[in-house]
Image (tube, grey):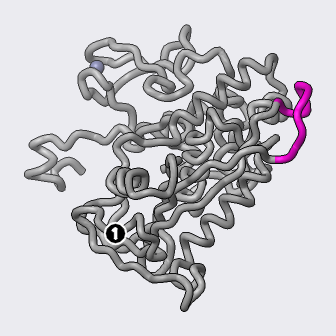
Amino acid sequence: MPDFPSSILAFQRQFADEAACASWLSAARWPEGFRCPACGHDRAWELGAKAWTYECAKCRRQTSVTAGTVMHGSKLPLTVWFWAAYLMATHSNGLSARQMWRQLGLGSYKSAWLLCAKLRRAMVNPARALLSGVVEIDETQVSYRTKDDPVTGGGGRSPDGKMQVAVAVEIVDEAPGRLRLGTIEDASSASLHPFIKANVAAGSTLKTDGWSAYPGVAGFNHEPHVVGAMAAHVVLPWVHRVISNLKTWALGVYHGLRRPHFQSYLDEFVFRFNRRRTPHAAFRTLLGITVAIKPATYNMLIAPEAKG
Ligand SMILES: [Zn+2]
C-alpha cells in the first residue's frame, strides 16, 4: 500500500500534480501491479493519447486509473479530488460545500456541492456488518435549524427543532468500537426495536439505562441498568461520550443541521467516528478506491515457490 502523508505540507508535496495523484492511485488499486479487469492479464501499456489509461496487452481493453472510483468521468483535476477527500477525511467537523468551494478555489458553488455530494455518498457502506457483542444503546435529542442560513438571507442562529436520535456503541475490550446513529420518531418500543434490529446482530447483549421501551426486543440479551441509583454516564459511559460529542459537533456544523438532511449528517458523524484512527482508510473510502486482488491461480496454489 502506498504511503499516506501525515500532514498538510506532506500531502501537498506528495500530491503536487496530476501525475503524482495518478501514480499513487495506480499503486493503491493494483498493489501487485496492473491487472486487466476484463481478462486478468498483468501486462499493459499506458496510452499516450488518453491520460492515465492502460491498454491490456492481451485483450486490448482500455482501463482508466479512475475507473470504478468516484473520480471517473469527472472534469475536475485529480488534485482537486484528492484535496477534497483529504479535507473531508481529516477535518473533525467536516466541511460544507461552501467551505469546499472557497478552500479549493472551485469555479462554481454547484461543482463544489456535487463534489461534496459524491464524496459523502461513499460514507455509508450498504454491506457493513452489524454491531455485535456488548452494545450500549441510548437515545437523545439533537437540535436542528429550519431557517435559511445567515449568508443567503433571513433566519436566526437559534435552534428551532429537536430530532430524536438512537445511538448504539459497540464495546470492545472496554473501549468503544463502532458506532451507529439513526433518527427515530420517538423513544417508544415501536421506534427503538427496529433501530436495534437494523444495526445490532441478534444474540448481542444490549446495555441500556433501563428505559421501559427497550425490553422485549426478540433475539437479544438485555442488560438494563436502572438509572437513579447510578448516573447514566457511569452506567453507559461510551454512549454518553458519543452523545456529548454529537451535540457539540451539531452546534459546530456550518450554520447548523437541517432537518431534510438529518440522517446524512448522522452518517457523516458515524463515518468519521468509525475511522477516527485511520484517516488513510477514510480517504480511500471517500474516493471509492477498491483494491484489485490478484486472483490466485492453480499454479500459485500448488507451487507458490515456483512462481518466485
Ligand atoms: Zn485484458
Q: How many marks?
A: 1
Q: Which residue is drawn at 24% across and 67% down?
A: 203
Locate ligand 1 by image quadrant: top left
* Main SS category, magenta section: loop
In the rendered image, which quarter is residue 126 located in?
top left
- Residue 200 horizontal/vertical position (percent): 34, 59
Q: Is residue 199 among the parts visible in the rendering?
A: no
- Residue 105 horizontal/vertical position (percent): 84, 26
Mark 1 highlights which residue? 215
- Residue 298 horizontal/vertical position (percent): 9, 42
Range of magenta residues: 148-158
Q: Is residue 136 among the parts visible in the rendering?
A: yes
Q: Which of 223 and 99 is in front in this view?
A: 223
Q: Residue at x 55, y 57 (%)?
A: 275
* Residue type, numbered disc 1: Pro
Residue 126 to residue 139: above or below: above
Q: Which residue is drawn at 47% across and 62% down?
A: 168
Q: Magenta stretch: residue 154 in it?
A: yes
Q: Which of 205 and 106 is in front in this view?
A: 205
In the rendered image, which quarter is residue 148 located in?
top right
